[in-house]
Structure formats: structure tokens, C-alpha cells
Image (cartoon, coloured by chain):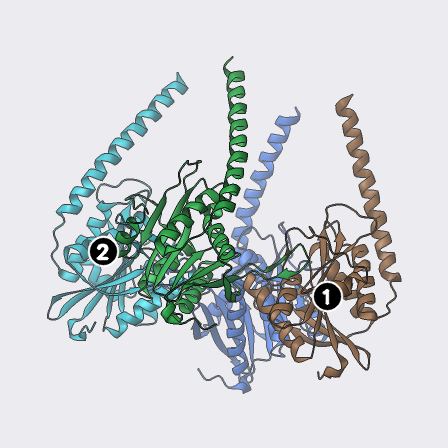
Chain colours: A blue, B cyan, C brown, D green
Amino acid sequence: MDIGKEKKPILICGLPGIGNIGRLAVDYIIDKFEMKKVCDIYSTHLPAQVFVSPESIVSLPKNTLYFKELSKTKSILIFTGDFQGTTIEGQYELSETILNLASEMGVTEVYTLGGYGIGKIVENPRIIGAVTDAKMKKKLSSKGVIFSENEPGGGIIGSAGIILGMAGEFYHMDAACLMGETPGFFTDPKGSIELIKALSKIVKFNIKLEDLEERAKSIEQITEKMHGEAQGKEQKEDLGYFV
Amino acid sequence: MDIGKEKKPILICGLPGIGNIGRLAVDYIIDKFEMKKVCDIYSTHLPAQVFVSPESIVSLPKNTLYFKELSKTKSILIFTGDFQGTTIEGQYELSETILNLASEMGVTEVYTLGGYGIGKIVENPRIIGAVTDAKMKKKLSSKGVIFSENEPGGGIIGSAGIILGMAGEFYHMDAACLMGETPGFFTDPKGSIELIKALSKIVKFNIKLEDLEERAKSIEQITEKMHGEAQGKEQKEDLGYFV
Amino acid sequence: MDIGKEKKPILICGLPGIGNIGRLAVDYIIDKFEMKKVCDIYSTHLPAQVFVSPESIVSLPKNTLYFKELSKTKSILIFTGDFQGTTIEGQYELSETILNLASEMGVTEVYTLGGYGIGKIVENPRIIGAVTDAKMKKKLSSKGVIFSENEPGGGIIGSAGIILGMAGEFYHMDAACLMGETPGFFTDPKGSIELIKALSKIVKFNIKLEDLEERAKSIEQITEKMHGEAQGKEQKEDLGYFV
Amino acid sequence: MDIGKEKKPILICGLPGIGNIGRLAVDYIIDKFEMKKVCDIYSTHLPAQVFVSPESIVSLPKNTLYFKELSKTKSILIFTGDFQGTTIEGQYELSETILNLASEMGVTEVYTLGGYGIGKIVENPRIIGAVTDAKMKKKLSSKGVIFSENEPGGGIIGSAGIILGMAGEFYHMDAACLMGETPGFFTDPKGSIELIKALSKIVKFNIKLEDLEERAKSIEQITEKMHGEAQGKEQKEDLGYFV
């Protein structure tokens, strides 16, 4: 697919990870924008298995690049996939592959999406940022992204981290990782919504979030119910223990 | 070995796996059809050991391709072996190797055989199918292969999966995985018999199954005996517990 | 960077390891001598993650080479980094990379720094040596390095070992590993100080150690306090047990 | 080193393994025959560490090939080393390396030495054989090597197995593995003595075994003492239990 460099594509990467919120966010954008597939990337660093669809049709695990023209001078590329590389070497190789492709297509701006696991349910998930340079930090701060001195403490593990790092250090792209706060225990649409909201401000696009908000609400209800039951149970046990 | 493309070879793959039923099925076909060895495939991705025969002769672990002309316009190739690749990369490499060979020999139709572990003994094992496209599904349905929306739930792991996936996505071959229901606890000739019956309908060949049926019967008797004893034991223990 | 061979650069390697004393020693020297970065070395054998600075700027894990001219005929190169290679192959590859670079720059003398974990706090840590030949042993003995028949008993694991071994066996450089005694439980500036003192005698350079001595003293106070408390606790428990 | 093919070198391989008896046997032969080193083989598939000698001199882990001319028309090559390859791929690569070298030097006959772990002390360890063809079996049977239908049950793991397998299948050499019975719990000179005796009959050389016999005797005495004490202890405990 020939994507003119004049369309200034911005690369957004969302692979499976903590709370799956990056993957969920890009899946939603791909779906709502009816994005076009650019190419599939297969690798011996992805698991040796096939998926079977409800129609019994098989497909190999893969990573995929999608494209959408937003205007004559703006477009987005989304990189997503079934798995991250199964080895360190595989994660580096797949990250290099996508960045080579992006570079050829004229990408100079990259956002990787990830979850920031905080181990509890949070009312209003913040979006924590990490960037390649001070310029990006200033730009994103003005869009509501939080830069916090001790967060994330342990660095950024996996492709959300190294695509960002490689984009900056090897490809001289402006890049950032946007990390949505998430409990980290289950697939979390609430964190994904915040990621999409942040992206829509940064990249400037409009997207309706009703479906995702409904999904988030129903998951929240289930979670609260489970949480309430778990607390009730603990209470009972506690009572039983101390009486 | 020069195998004319006019003989339209169909590739059947049966490597060790769940219940070993794929491997057992192809071993039986190779034996009954007195198939000719095309080549051995050795790999640094197979275990670093040798087998020792009862005659004290050693052999390296390998995968092997066999050939049999069924008629002037039909033939089969069988791919089998001692082990699947020991690593993900090895499984992909060995699968690519056999598909490259098959492609050069004019193969356009592939069946991989596997076990579908259901954790219990089953009277009449079904053959569950997964395919590369709807056309194959229709063809196999008419031969008694079952296509079921939720089976197999977790995809197909290992070479039965990726040979199928790669055959479809990279080589544009018509391909299917035939999975025989099997307890999964022991080598299961009963599931192998059903695989061979399904294959003989699909590929259209005649093969006598007496030997395998006898073997299945004797294994079934042993299993039932073990099962009966195990149940008897459980019953006694239960009695002991509740009295 | 063109470093004239007439400057006879001496290579000093300090990567993370036991008590982190090698890494800490070279960090201190790089800082005090305001050494210049020659190059960064990235590798798919380093962890697939990025670090995030307090300013939220990311950086990929790397190994780095620094340079400092000490006089017209003497200079030092320091090789350090965030991690050692994550695999055996990676450790060999990274060691070969730095030795190739060093060899091109005219290095004929190499010191690798490491910790010699002795499992307890030691008043005056010795510097134990291991070398490529008897000539180096004689040279270092005269500078206070200890050569002891049974130390280190289990050989030298990781890059401090193989850079030394490869420097001698493949590059015909004079090389030694200097191992500072260290408890091995925590980052130990006391061992680092002894390493720097030994190096300053061997390579002949002057460096002020006040900062590191202060740091060592404060860590020692903390450790003694912890140690005292731990002993007190044990004593109490002992009393409780025997009375 | 130029070794004339007219000297018909026979390759003997003894690497660390069960009871270490293969390694110990070749070490003894190398020493007694004052064999000359042909070359060292280093590999990124050997552990990333160095050994430190009592003189504090380091050396990288390696495999080594030694040579000895026995007569104008007979010679032996011995392949030994500090470790076997740390990975499957490494074991295959190192085996290929030595067989390529051997092939170039005109080797057509190969013996790999190994231990056959039987889990108990044995008075007169047998030498069990496994071979590449019936001709070798006949030859070795006449020299006292035992060929037994069910031994070794699980094949031959590691380089003693794959050097043998590859020698036969890829290099068309006559090859055998000689496995000395050994408890498998400790380094066992007794098994090594039997291996050397078997080799001296097969390859036809004379070697004095006094040193090794003394060492075996003293190890046997230690073992018997330990065994006696262990039995005594068990007896006492048994008495204590039943009285």
C-alpha cells in the first residue's frame, strides 16, 4: 500500500499487555474508523499455534498494521497483534520490523499504549506518560497526560517500552508511551476509554465512545458485585475468627 | 525422488501429540501401504540424543517423508517423525521445511492429524475439523467430519496447527486439521482408527483396519479393567469414609 | 572517535555484578574524570524494556564505552552498562564486541572488576586477582593485589570472567580480573573504594575518594545498625528459647 | 597440525557425563601417552565463565582435540573438554565441528565413551555397546563388549549419543558408544578402568593402569565405608522403630 508521506502518518501501537487496555483501545479505534489493513507480520517469535474461529477457520498468530486517512495532511497507522514476541530477541525483532515499516512510510511521531497496573480499582484512571524528549513532554502535558517523578517506578517492560525507546534512539522519531491506570487483574475497558480520550486530544480525531462506555459500565457492575461479595465474605470470616 | 506433479500428491502429517493418535494413524498407513521413504529431515531443533534399537543399532531423531502412488493421477505423501521441534522456532522451521518440499512436489492439499483431548474414554470418537477456508469445510462436512463452534476452544498447538496455518496463509494450499477425540492419557489406537476411516473417505483409499482394531480392543480391555479397579477402589474408600 | 594508539589506552570493565562494586567503581571514575562517551552498545541480548528517568525520559538498556586521556602517552577506556547479557550467547557476543573495539583502539592491557562475595562484612576488603599469565601476576602482586591458591574457588562467572579469558586467549592482551571482597548482599561502596585504590596504583592515576568514602561510611553505619538490631533480636529470641 | 591419513587416526570421544567415566578414561590416556594437543574449540554454547588455576591463571571453558601416533599406520585422536554444549543446538554444533575436523584428518572409526548409570555399586562393571551397524557389533562383541536387547533403555543422551549417530548417518564412519556400568552418583575410576581395558583391546594399545587402579581402590574403600555407615545407621533406626 502506497501511503503518501504528505499524509504524515502517526503510528499508534497497542499490543496485549497489563489490563489489555492498549490492545482494547486500538481494537476499538480500528473498528470505529473502519481502518484498512496494510500488512500482517508473522514471526517464529510468536507462539507455534493457530487460532480457530467459530466458523472453524484457522489463522496463525500475527501482528498487523492498519491505516486510516484522517484528512489530506493527517493519517494514523495502528500496530496491534495477537501476542508480543515470546523472547527478548523476538520482541526486539518485531519492534524493529514495525519501526522500519513506519520509517519508510514517513512516520515521525509514535504513541505506544500500555497499562499501568496499580493493583486496585480506580475511579478516574490517569494517563501517565513517558517520552523520548522534553519537547514531547511539554506537548503531552498540555493535553492532560500526567508526568510523575516516580511513575512508573520499574521502567516499561515489553514492546510498549522498546518501540518507544528504539523510535527515539534509532529512528529519531518523537515518541511517547501513554499508560492508563488499571487494576491489572482483568481486561479493563475503563482504562482503554481514557487512553482513547487522551489520543483523540493529542492526535486530534473524533470518536464516539458509547459502546466502550457501556461495556466498561457492565464490567464495573460485575466487578463491584464480585468485590462486594468478596468483602462480605472476608467480613464474615473475620467475624467468625474474632468472636 | 522425482514425483511427477501429475500424480497430485496429497500431504498427510502425523507427528507425536495428544494420545499420539496422529502418529499412530500414519505409522499404520505407511506400514500397510508399504510406502517408500522420500527423505529424512534432521534438525538441531530435535532432541540431542540417539535411539538404540533392540539390535543395539543407533539412530538420530528425525522427521521423515514417505510416498505412495495410489493411481496414475493420485498419490499420498506422509510426513511423520520421532518428535516435534523442541522450540517454537524449531517448530516453525520444520514446518516450513516440509511445506517447501511439498510445494515443490506439487502438493495443493494438506491434512494434519491430531488428537482432541477430552479427558475421558469415549465410545465413538468424533473427528473434529479445522480448515483454511469455507470450501474445505463444506468438502469435509460431507465426509462426516464435525465442525463445532466451540471446539477446539484453545486453538491448535504445535505442528498440526502451524503446518495447517502456514499451508493456507503462505502456500495457498487447501488444508485441514483432523482431530480425533481421545482421552489423552495414553496412546489411543481407537482414535487413530477413526482418523484413518475419515482420511480414507476424504482421500479415497482402501485400507484394512483389522490389526489396529485388535490392538484397540486389547487396549480397551486393559483400560476398562484398570478403570473398573480404580472405581472399585474409590467405592471402597468412599464407603470407608461415610460409614 | 579517533583515539590515537600512541595514547596506549588501558581498558577497564565494570558491569553490574556481585555487590555491584565493579559498576560502582567505574561509575565513580567516569564521573570524577568527566570521561567522554565513545559509543553506546545496544543488543537484543539485553532486557526488552526501557528505563524512565525522573524527568519521564526513557532510555533503552545499553552498555557504554568511555574515554579519558591521562597524559600524552596514557589514557583509559571504561566499559560499563546497565546489564550483562541475558544469555550465555549474549554474554559472549557483548564481550567480543567490546574487545574488537578495544583491539582496534590499540588496547593491550585490560582490567575487569568484580566482587568476591564472602557472605559477611569485612573490615579491610582484600583485592583478589586472576590473570592471563605469570607476568601480570608479578606486576599486580607488587601493587598489593592478592593471589591466593583457592580463591575464587568456583571460577569467575559472567563478563568479568570471559572478557578476561577472551582478552588473553583470543586477543593476546595482558589482562586481569580484580575482585574486591564484599558481603554480596547489598551495593557495597567499601569494596569499590578498594578497587579504585588498586586501579590507581596499577594504572597510575590520582582520584579523590571523599564522596565514596562518605557514602561507604553512611552505608556502614546503617548496616551496623541493622546488624546490631538483628543480633539483639536473635539474642532475645535465644534467651526466650533457653530460659 | 598435519596428520597424514596413512596414520589412520581413530577418534575417541570422552566428555563429562554420567559418573564422569568417559572423561576420566580419556584424561588418563592423554596423560599416559603424553598426547599432543591438536586444537582447542571454544564456543558460545559453553558456559560464560572462566576457570582459575591454583596459580591464579584463567582459562575459558573449551573442548580439545589431542593426537598420538601409535605406529606408522595407526594413531589416535582424543576429543574431550570441560563441558558438553549447554543447549541442544550447541551440542549438535560442537559434534559437527569435531566430526568435520575428524573427517578432514581421515578418521573412519569413532568411539564415544559414556557411563551407564545403574544406581548401585557393581563388582565387575560391564561395557555395554551401541553401534552404527551390524559389522561394528560383531567386531566389538569379539572384544568383550556386551550388546543387550534392553540396554540402554532410554537411548543415549548428549554428545556420546549424537557424535555416534552423526558419525554413522552423515559421515559414514564406523562408530560405537562404549558405556561402562557405573553407580552414577560420583566420579567413578572403576568404570573408567573397564573402558580403557575395552579400548586397548579394540584399538590395540598398551597402557599401564596402576595409578587408576590405586585411585579406584581408595575411592572404593571410602565408598564402602560410607555405605557401611549408612547401612549401620539405617539398621539402628530400623531397630529403634520396631522395638
Q: Please state the horizontal and vertical placement of residue A181, each as a whole percent of the image.
A: 63, 57
Tell me the quadrant of the picture where the C terminus of chain A can be found.
top right
**Residue at the top extreme of this rendering:** D243
Q: Please state the horizontal and vertical placement of residue D155, each as a whole percent of the image.
A: 35, 49
**Chain ID, mark 1:** C
**Residue type at numbered disc 2:** Val
Is B104 left, or right, of C217 in this rendering? left
Near-viewer residue (A124 or D228): D228
The picture quadrant where one finds residue C242 is top right
SS at circle 2: helix
**Residue type at numbered disc 1:** Met
**Residue A199 in view:** no
Is D93 left, or right, of A174 in this rendering? left
Tell me the quadrant of the picture where the N terminus of chain A can be found.
bottom left
**Which residue is depicted at the point 54% across and 68% down?**
A92
Near-viewer residue (B44 or C211): B44
- The residue tagged 2 is B26
**Chain ID, mark 2:** B
Near-viewer residue (B232 or D128): D128
Near-viewer residue (C200 or D176): D176
**Which residue is depicted at the point 82% across and 67% down?**
C200
SS at circle 1: helix
Q: Please state the horizontal and vertical placement of residue B103, each as a whole percent of the image.
A: 27, 72
Is B99 left, or right, of C211 in this rendering? left
Q: Please state the horizontal and vertical placement of residue C140, each as a whole percent of the image.
A: 77, 63
Is A77 left, or right, of A117 in this rendering? left
- The residue tagged 1 is C136
**Residue C17 in view:** yes
- Specify few, some or many for label 1: CA neighbours under 10 Å numbering under 14, 14-19, or 20 or more: some
